Amino acid sequence: MRNLILVLLVALCSAEQPRPNFIVINIDDLGYADIGPFGSKLNRTPNLDRMAKEGMRLTSYYAAPVCSPSRAMLMTGCYPKRVLPTPHVLFPAAEVGLHPDEVTVAETLKAAGYATACVGKWHLGDQAPFLPNAQGFDFYFGIPYSNDMGMASEGSKSDLGKPTPKDEPKSRAGKMNPPETGLRGSDQPPLPMLRDGKAIARVKQGEQQRLVADYTREAEAFIRRSKDGPFFLYLPHSSVHFPLYPGQAWAGKSPHGHYSDWVEETDWSVGRILDTLRELGLDQRTLVIFTSDNGGTTRSSNAPLKGHKGSTWEGGVRAPTIAWWPGKIPAGTSSDVITGMFDVHPTFAKLAGAKLPDRKVDGIDLSPVLLGKDGAKGHDEFLYFRGLTLEAVRAGRWKLMLEGSNAPFQSKQPKKEAPLRLYDLEADVGETTDLAAANPDVVQRLLARAAAVDADLGRTETGPGVRPLGRFPNPRPVIGHDGTVRPDAVGTTVRFP
C-alpha cells in the first residue's frame, strides 16, 4: 500500500506543469505599422508574421509617450507617474532614477525562484543603485540609456554613413554638476556598454552597428544557460531608435533605407530567440511578449493612428504588441481590449504563482485575455500621462483629450490651449472627428474622471499616490569625457582612452 501511494505521488508530481518562462522583447521607437502583422507593406518581417500567426495581436496595448516612463511602467506594473515622476526621460549622470524600494517584475520573479536577465537598453537611471543588477536582474548586458546619449564625434548623433559632428560642449567646465535628470545634448559623455554593472566597452560607430547582434547573442546564451528554468528574459533592444545603425549584414539590404534595414534586422533577432526556444523544446513552456516602448517617430509609420512619439495621440502611445505561447495562446487571434505595459508584472506574477508587492499596482492579470477565456476583460479605462500632466482619459470606446494637451515638451513658443476634444476610438481610431459637441454627457463623465485623478496621482502636480524618486547625490557618468571610468563601474581589463 505504501509503495502504491509513493507511486501515485510521483505520478502526480511528474504530471505537474512546470512554471512558464517569460520573455519580453521591447523595441525602441517602433511604429504601430512598422511590422507586417500591423500592416507594414515596406518592411519585411517574416518572423513577426509567423509569431502573430501562432499567437495573439494586442491592438490596444498602451505604453507611455517616451522611453523612461514606459520602462518604469513595464517594470513596476504602475502608471509611470506613480513610480517615476519626472517631466521627460532620464539622461546620463542623472541624480534620480527608479527608486530601489520599488519592486520590479524581475524582483517578484526572482523571489519565486526565477533566473533573471536584462539584455539591452535600461533607461531607468545609470547610477549604481538604479541599474538592473540592483533591481532584480541576475545578469545585465547593455547600454544604460538611449544610443543617442553619447558623444557626437563617436557617432551617437548621426546615422550610419553620415558625417560625425564635432563635440561642442556648452556647459562642461571644471567639475561637472549635471541637472537632476542628467546631461543633455553636447554635454553628454561617452556611451558605455555594461556587463553586470561594469563598463566593458566604449560604444562608438562600430559597436553601435553590432548592437542587435550582440544583444541577440547574449540573450540566446542566457536562454541556453537557463533552459532548465524557470527564467525571465527582458530584451529591450536599442533598435530602432536614432541614430540608425543596422548591422553590416543588413545595411543597405532593404529597399527603403537604414530605418527599414534596422526593422528587418530586429525581426531577424526575434526569429533567433523563437528558434532557440523551439530548438530547446521550450516553446510551449515560454510566454513571449513583443512590443515597443512608445509610438514611432516621424521616420516610422503609425498608420492608421494619429501622432508620433512624445504625444498622447494614439500614435504616440499605442504599441504594436504580440503575445506568443504555443499551445496556450490561441493561434492567429487578436484582442482589442485595453491593455498596457503595466499589465506585464501582474500577469507574470499570476502565471508564476508569485506574490505581487504589497503596494498599489495599476496593472491587472491579463492571462484570461491571453489564454482566450470567454468573457475575459481588459481595463475599463486608461489615463494618458505625458510627464506629470494628465492629457487624456479613455473609458471604453471614448477618449477625451483635455485642454492644452500635446503642446511641445520644451517649446519656447507661448503655449496654445487646445480645446476639449472627444473621439470614438472604435469608429475613428485615427482621431479625425471631434464629437465633443454632440456628446456633452460623455464629456462631463470623462471630465469627472479626470478631476478624480487629483485624489491619487494628480492631474498636473504630484498627488498623494505618487511615490518618491530614487536619489543618488553627486552623480557621475559611467565613463567621463576624459575616458575615466566611474569607480563602481570599473572593469578589470578594460581602459577607455
Image (cartoon, rainbow, N blue to C red):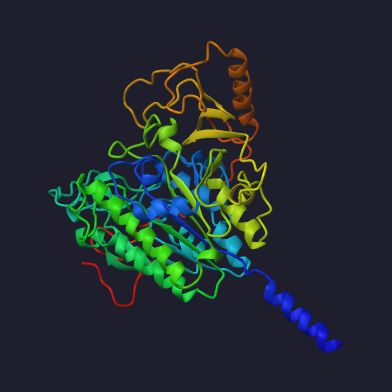
x and y percentages locating residue 37 in the rendered image: 40, 45
x and y percentages locating residue 210 in the rendered image: 26, 62
| Image-quadrant location for residue 189 | bottom left
Say if residue 224 shows up in the picture: yes
Residue 191 is left or right of residue 288, and the answer is left
Residue at 26%, 57% (x, y): give it: 190
x and y percentages locating residue 455 in the rendered image: 65, 32
Quadrant of the frame with the C terminus: bottom left
Q: Is residue 91 above or below residue 108?
A: above
Residue at 32%, 63% (x, y): give it: 193
Say if residue 488 shows up in the picture: no
Compare residues 214 and 100 and report the one nearer the observer. Answer: 214
Residue at 40%, 69% (x, y): give it: 220
| Image-quadrant location for residue 439 | top right
Q: Is residue 209 above or below residue 424?
A: below
Quadrant of the frame with the N terminus: bottom right
- Residue with the most extreme left position: 163
x and y percentages locating residue 44 in the rendered image: 30, 49
Compare residues 167 and 288 and report the one nearer the observer. Answer: 288
Residue 226 is left or right of residue 412, and the answer is right
Residue at 43%, 44% (x, y): give it: 320
| Image-quadrant location for residue 175 | bottom left
- Residue with the most extreme top position: 437
- Residue with the most extreme right position: 1
